[in-house]
Image (spheres, coloured by chain):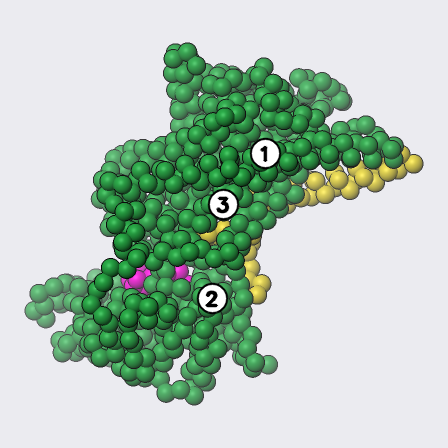
Chain colours: A green, B yellow
């Protein structure tokens, strides 16, 4: 049996690691063109002719110092799990900065192979890279590739296998830190000799880390009390040692680049010209707002609602009619007919009709992401957020929250500062995830038939505003401190590919369908039961268990304008998954039998009006997130205290804001 | 006949519904989104997700 070769993919954020991972393994991991898309290591398998290769995709990092969780994940994996080869993906169009990580990876002692990616972009900018010379100067193999076109991948795998089998001479060259530091490194290396616990570590790396005052390494070596700063003084260095070492690494890189890269004088690319407008200090935010309004126009007026009407008719009339007739013909009991038609078709169908809107929203967002615009949004928001003391980096997980809050909260791992991270976790659920869209669409269509897009757009904006506002409060109370600087690279603008968009949208649609066929299906069954029965048997809706539960909680919502049991029960069950709010409403108001939003509006008119419907949507936007998100908050904060706080304060904020909407609206005569 | 069909259909639907509901809730409480494709969701780190390539 052949031994499995483990290769780790490491590189700067946004250098194409996940694209290479997908190319090598045939996987379809999400590829983003902004930093922080991968925050966990992911594994895939590659079978070549004679070898079994395990590929591990690590989070992107600029360095291997333990400043943030994603850097720690990458570093710990390479140091502790000791992969056979580290494939360092280097963006050929940004080679100087990318090589900084390479110098650190080489010091770790594991064999490193550089995959020089995006050669096409580098060539289009007129860069001329002497790959052989670069390889010679670094002392390690360098393979030019274009991961997005799967070019050079066979050669890369071939080189990796040869390195593991020692068929290629491998002698990495290191930065020279000057006589004083090098003497100190040698002294430390000597002191590590004979310690079996340190066998798996590179002595040179350990020595450099001690000099850099890396707390984790110093703890490992029981050297926490070693005063390295004093040592720097003794060595008469002007800078602190960490800066001095970084400077030496850059000197090493500059020297190599000067001998292996020729590039033309800086010229403005098309992306630079577009950025002058889209990321303009004054125009950036208004343009973003305009684009998002366009997204909702597309989601509702242009395409989404036309398809929605067709599906609505299919579920409410065609399918429900067919199933009723068939069940009646074969003599199925009335209660089972009701379960299938009113409960399952009504509840699941009531959610599924919004599939076109969800698909349209994700198509539009995918276009913005793949074109490179969403990365600009993070840049624009960074400027605005830093003015109020929040890290701009926190806005990336906020944008991800438009999809699903659970992975978005995991995305906060890129934040170095623990206070920034907690703030970002706690405000993330205010970002309106896709599960809430069916609720808005249902109510907006029923009560604001000609202004759906404006109403839904206002809710998304309100979510962002509340998130930033609450973040500001946290930053000035619970989590005081300066915001950490945010460095991000803006990818060049690209025309999104049909294949890429199809994959993104299909992933979302598939997820939505799976959720409808599993969780929502099961929930509808339970809802049908609790809405049709009480402990004495089948009863009228108002006497049911569900109505009883709703009536207990309804008074809480009375100051918000929707103190009825129907709304209360929907909101409670919505904690399971937000779509269940719609299923609940569908079953309660029996929209399986009503074919249009007007009919639904009529059914709802007894319990809601325009103002209370809007207050209800605001509450759904802001209140306690779904169970999965709560579980992720617990996992990421590792604290029941913060999880409980998150659940409680979000309910409080939702109650307060919805109450303000209703009370102020009432005073203004709406 | 009608009663037999009712019984079979009810057992299948209620059985599936109950099973899938319990399984989904269990998944949700672990922080895994039901419906997450493990590939489409950015940063998906579902604890139940295992490499299958």
Magenta residues, start to end: A58-67
User: Which residue matches tag 3?
Assistant: A362
Say whether mark 1 and mark 3 are on the same chain. yes
Q: Are marks 2 and 3 in contact (CB under 8 Å)?
A: no
Residue A589 lies, with reference to residue B44, above or below; the image says above
- Residue at image coords 42%, 39%: A294
- Residue at image coords 67%, 32%: A313
- Residue at image coords 53%, 72%: A46
Q: Percent from the top left, x then y, of residue A599?
A: 63, 22
In the foreground, A572 or A325 = A325
User: Which residue matches tag 2?
Assistant: A21
In the picture, the disc for residue A340 is none
Task: Tell which circle, 3 or 1, labels the residue nearer the N-terminal end.
Answer: 3
Look at the image and tell me whether residue A224 can be seen. no
**Secondary structure mostly seen in the magenta stretch:** loop
Q: CA distance from mark 2 to mark 1?
A: 36 Å
Quarter holding residue A589: top right
């Amino acid at each position: 049996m052949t031994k499995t070769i483990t290769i780790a993919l490491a590189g700067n954020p946004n250098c194409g690691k996940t694209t290479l991972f997908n190319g090598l393994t045939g996987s379809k991991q999400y590829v983003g063109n902004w930093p922080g898309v991968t925050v966990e290591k992911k594994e895939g398998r590659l079978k070549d002719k004679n070898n079994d290769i395990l590929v591990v995709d690590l989070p992107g990092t600029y360095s291997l110092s333990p400043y943030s969780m994603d850097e720690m994940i990458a570093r710990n994996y390479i140091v502790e799990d000791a992969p056979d080869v580290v494939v360092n993906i280097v963006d050929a169009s940004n080679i100087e900065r990318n090589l900084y990580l390479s110098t650190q990876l080489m010091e770790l002692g594991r064999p490193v192979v550089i995959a020089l990616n995006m050669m096409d972009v580098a060539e289009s900018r007129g860069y001329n890279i002497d790959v052989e010379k670069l390889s010679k100067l670094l002392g390690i193999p360098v393979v030019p590739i274009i991961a997005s076109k799967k070019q050079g991948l066979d050669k890369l795998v071939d080189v990796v296998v040869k390195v593991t089998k020692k068929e290629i001479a491998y002698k990495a060259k290191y930065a020279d830190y000057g006589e004083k530091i090098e003497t100190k490194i040698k002294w430390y290396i000597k002191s590590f000799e004979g310690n079996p616990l340190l066998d798996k570590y590179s002595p040179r790396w350990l020595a450099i880390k001690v000099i850099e005052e890396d707390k984790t390494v110093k703890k490992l070596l029981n050297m926490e009390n070693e005063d390295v700063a004093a040592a720097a003084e003794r060595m008469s260095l002007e800078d602190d040692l960490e800066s001095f070492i970084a400077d030496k690494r850059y000197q090493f890189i500059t020297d190599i680049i000067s001998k292996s890269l020729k590039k033309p004088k800086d010229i403005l690319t098309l992306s630079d010209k577009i950025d002058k407008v889209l990321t303009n200090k004054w125009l950036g935010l208004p343009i973003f707002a305009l684009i998002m309004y366009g997204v909702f126009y597309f989601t509702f007026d242009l395409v989404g609602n036309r398809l929605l009407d067709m599906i609505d008719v299919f579920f409410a009339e065609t399918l429900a009619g067919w199933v009723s007739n068939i069940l009646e013909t074969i003599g199925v009991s009335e209660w089972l007919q009701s379960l299938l038609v009113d409960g399952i078709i009504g509840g699941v169908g009531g959610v599924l009709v919004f599939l076109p809107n969800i698909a349209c929203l994700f198509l539009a967002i995918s276009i913005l992401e793949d074109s490179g615009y969403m990365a600009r949004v993070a840049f624009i928001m960074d400027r605005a957020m830093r003015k109020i003391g929040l890290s701009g980096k926190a806005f990336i997980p906020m944008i991800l929250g438009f999809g699903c809050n659970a992975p978005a909260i995991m995305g906060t791992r890129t934040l170095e500062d623990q206070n920034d991270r907690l703030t970002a976790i706690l405000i993330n659920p205010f970002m309106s995830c896709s599960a809430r869209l069916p609720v808005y669409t249902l109510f907006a269509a029923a009560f604001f038939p000609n202004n759906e897009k404006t109403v839904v757009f206002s809710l998304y904006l309100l979510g962002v505003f509340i998130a930033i506002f609450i973040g500001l409060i946290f930053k000035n109370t619970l989590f005081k401190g300066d915001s950490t600087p945010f460095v991000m690279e803006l990818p060049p603008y690209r025309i999104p590919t049909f294949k890429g968009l199809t994959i993104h949208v299909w992933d979302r649609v598939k997820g939505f369908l799976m959720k409808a066929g599993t969780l929502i299906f099961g929930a509808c069954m339970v809802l049908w039961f609790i809405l049709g029965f009480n402990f004495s048997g089948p009863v009228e809706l108002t006497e049911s268990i569900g109505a009883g539960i709703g009536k207990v909680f309804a008074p809480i919502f009375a100051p918000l304008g929707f103190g009825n049991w129907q709304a209360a029960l929907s909101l409670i069950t919505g904690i399971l998954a937000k779509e269940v709010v719609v299923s609940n409403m569908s079953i309660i108001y029996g929209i399986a039998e009503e074919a249009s939003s007007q009919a639904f509006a009529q059914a709802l008119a007894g319990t809601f009006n325009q103002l209370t419907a809007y207050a209800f949507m605001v509450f759904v936007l802001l209140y306690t997130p779904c169970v999965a998100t709560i579980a992720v908050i617990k996992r990421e904060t590792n604290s029941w205290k913060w999880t409980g706080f998150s659940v409680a304060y979000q309910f409080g904020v939702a109650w307060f804001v919805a109450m303000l909407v209703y009370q102020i609206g009432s005073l203004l005569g709406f | 006949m009608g009663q037999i069909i009712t019984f079979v259909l009810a057992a299948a639907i209620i059985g599936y519904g109950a099973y899938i509901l319990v399984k989904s809730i269990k998944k949700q409480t672990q922080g895994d989104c039901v419906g997450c494709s493990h590939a489409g969701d950015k940063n998906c780190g579902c604890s139940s997700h295992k490499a299958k390539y």
